[in-house]
Image (cartoon, helix red, strand yellow):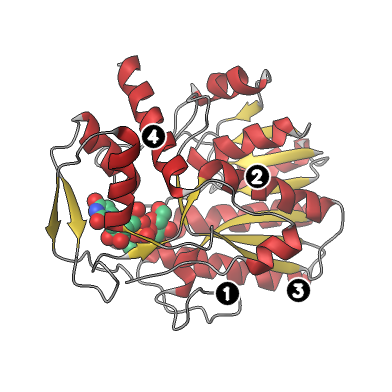
Amino acid sequence: MKILVTGGTGYIGSHTVVELQAKGHEVIIIDNLSNSNINVLDAIEKISGIKPEFENFDLADMAKTEDFFQRNNDIDGIIHFAAFKAVGESVDNPLMYYRNNLYSLVNILQGMKDNSIPNLVFSSSCTVYGQPEELPVNEEAPVQKAESPYGNTKQISEEVIFDTTKASDIKAIALRYFNPIGAHESTEIGELPLGVPNNLMPFITQTAIGIREQLSVFGDDYNTPDGTAIRDYIHVVDLAQAHVIAVERMVNKNMKKDFEYFNLGTGNGYSVLEVIKSFEKVSEQKLNYKIVGRRAGDVEQVWADTNFANDELGWKAKKNIDEMTLSAWKWELKLQTEK
Ligand code: UD1
């Protein structure tokens, strides 16, 4: 199959490209390198032996997107990762988020419609559930008002896609990620946060290696066993493999509905302190951290009911929390040796 991966030099995108190549699929990447590095293409080639085709432009640019689809109307499926994802930044600059995340989606859907390319896999987020009333949360749980413009772009995108699937031949699968962490076992690709990381795992590894002085644990007064917030961390390679299965399901016409959505998590929740403990165990060192107040917009606890994804996609996350924190640590060590 010929698969377009937007945002293919990014964190989840690059891991997905490698998994697509491993299954024999041909990949074209579009990325404007706004939050990634061109060297990722060489890293992908080191792993798979194949350098993917690459185009550098902004999918929010309608004319360029139209031109791309006219030249590439033989694409079988699209996996759309290209988007901004920093929650705090989206609060400070909502228009930048709405413009980037929504214009690019609309342009892609238009290109798909005009060129009869029917299959879209969309990067969504468990953020659409907010704080669910029941845990684990399944796909039928109500979508709750987004806490940030970033979260809102994911909700609006799902609606834009849903309406488009009703009015055209386009079919789509939205994958609702829980908390992706870790890196490829080759340590050729991984997460490359620009500046101070917002997310827990890169902040832990950067603290351990001495780039950050101390990790702040946001709140220990939650209604959880140790008082810190609980999330469902999933290894990025497990997550990437689900994308390959999803796009194959679409191209092979195995979908049950024109728009399907799946939770991608492990089904296990870990508290912030449990992640730290796992990290300390696998890295054999003490982490410098302190408890501070809660972070605005954080939910208390969320983890996935993965039954639907397990049964329908025939996919299950394999890596446990220690494997995940170890792989994140190996990646940080590798980045350090390159400096
Ligand atoms: C965040 C976003 C979410 C987005 C996801 C991927 C928020 C509120 N949510 O998820 O919408 O889809 O990233 O980009 O930002 N923590 C600390 N100290 C830190 C960093 C994090 O204690 O320095 C805690 C957080 O309070 C949370 C947990 O670690 O309890 C995980 O945080 P994080 O990795 O930022 O992910 P989410 O907030 O779950």
Q: Which residue is mark 4?
A: 192
Image spot of residue 211 (x, y percent): 20, 31
Viewer-nearest of discs 3 and 1: 1
The tag earlier along the polypeptide, 2 or 4, is 4
Q: Which residue is mark 1?
A: 138
Q: Give, as a three-letter code, the residue at label 1.
A: Asn
Residue drawn at 56 percent across, 35 percent down: 14
Ligand 1: image quarter:
bottom left
The tag earlier along the polypeptide, 1 or 4, is 1
Marks 4 and 3, how far apart in space? 37 Å
Q: Which mark is residue 313?
A: none
- State the residue in front, 9 or 129: 129
- Horizontal side of 213 relative to 270 (left or right) equals left
**Label 3 neighbour load within 10 Å: few <14, some 14-19, many 20+:** few
Q: Which residue is mark 2?
A: 241
Asked whether the residues under the numbered discs 2 and 1 touch, taking CB atoms below 8 Å apart as contact, a structural biologist would say no
Q: Secondary structure at mark 2?
A: helix
Q: Which mark is residue 166?
A: 3
Marks 3 and 1, how far apart in space? 23 Å
Q: Secondary structure at mark 3?
A: helix
Q: Give, as a three-letter code, the residue at label 2.
A: Gln
Q: Quadrant of residue 298?
A: bottom left
The tag earlier along the polypeptide, 4 or 3, is 3
Viewer-nearest of discs 1 and 4: 1
**Label 4 neighbour load within 10 Å: few <14, some 14-19, many 20+:** some
